[in-house]
Image (spheres, helix red, strand yellow):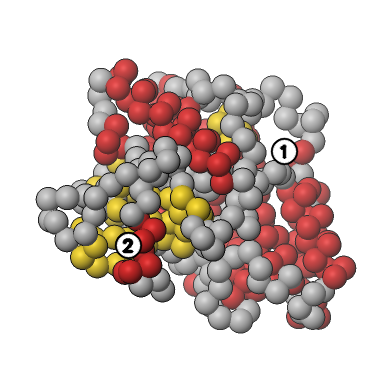
Amino acid sequence: MRTVENISEIVSNFNCVVDIDSLKTYGSGHINDTYFIKNMNSSGCDYLLQRINHHIFKDVPQLSSNMCKVIDHLKDKLLLSGSGNPEKEVMTLVPAKDGRYFYQDINGDYWRLSYFLKNTKSYDVVETEKQAYEGGKAFGKFQAMLADLPTGILYEVIPDFHHIGRRLEQLNDAIAKDAADRLVSVAAELDIIKAYADSMSYFQQPEQIIGLPKRVIHNDTKFNNVLLNMKDEAQCVIDLDTVMDGYIAYDFGDAVRTIINTTVEDEKDLSKIRLNIPLFNAYTKGYLKEAGQFITNTELNSLFKGVLLLPYMQSVRFLTDYLNGDQYFKIKFEGHNLQRTRAQLQLLKMLDQSSEMLQHTILSEMEKTEG
């Protein structure tokens, strides 16, 4: 935990005036370190300060450029529509004194400052159908507003981020090296991953994705990356580090992964992992209410492919990191990444068993939107 003095020195390099009343770690992200800064002046702004993990995001200037392009596009769309509030519905970055939207300290660490949106909240576990519905609306609207932002203009901050073939290659490399001497403990998990591998290659098969457009998407739509207001109404999509080109099914699948699960993504007791179908139905309804205006039939038919792919991919990524000695994701205890792997594989199994019903829901909700 950084001290107030450390943080004050960092914040002094940004274009703002703040007297720090209190400082605390914020959120449950796996990658960056985030701090909530409470302003001593009650009428002033509070802030979120993030230490950007530059070992993962290797080109922070390009990442920041991506974020600025997306933020500007979203704010312009809201202004043109005349029906939104850009300052509340889009995150706002604070420029550093040199004009860039990040600051690099003497230790080589990169920092980003944004305004904290007051009277908002996020959920690691969705509790009500209203929350799920509003989250669906938020991510659907986010995609809809970016639908006219051309692909090819954003930097690929993490190459092949959702390319399952590359992820499996990374897993195989981790198996070969067995750097942490853990391979002997994961035979059962590897058997499941290998059994599903061929069926998960849909988005890397050219003959399967004919006519499937790439778009600018979020790429990390965990439910806690949407802020709701105090009435549990959609307000703002956050955490834009991974916004880049991809298929909308990736975003739909990752959101469903964190909504439909009746417990947390790293649940130890696999018997607690069940599907909350009402939450899935509510999220799908909210999502298609906003996204239904632009998605094609090919995209619609691909959505459930993303629902299966994303928990599978997270399983592969967690297990790869476990075998590599926990170098990528933050962990709270030894074996955390293996526990995450097992939980995601259990979720995948249950989604697969309910595939016909879930696909029917997606298609029927789209029909209602069109009607």
| Res 79 quadrant in image | top left
Q: Mark 2 — residue?
A: 8
In this view of the protein, which residue sits in the foreground, 41 or 26?
Answer: 41
Can you say whether 345 is above or below 67 in the image? below
Q: Which residue is at 74% across, 53% downward?
A: 167
Residue 369, position as x, y percentages in the image: 41, 26
Classify 10 Å Cα crowding around label 2: few (below 14), some (14-19), many (20 and above). Answer: some
Q: Which residue is at 47% across, 67% downward?
A: 264
Residue 35, position as x, y percentages in the image: 37, 62
- Discs 2/1, front: 2
Residue 328, position as x, y percentages in the image: 63, 64
Q: Mark 1 — residue?
A: 203
Q: Which residue is at 44% across, 22% downward?
A: 293
Can you say whether 314 is above or below 70 in the image? below
Can you say whether 12 is above or below 365 in the image? below
Q: Which SS class for mark 2?
A: helix
Question: Split into 4 quadrants, where in the image is the N terminus?
Answer: bottom left
Q: Is residue 292 visible?
A: no
Classify 10 Å Cα crowding around label 1: few (below 14), some (14-19), many (20 and above). Answer: many
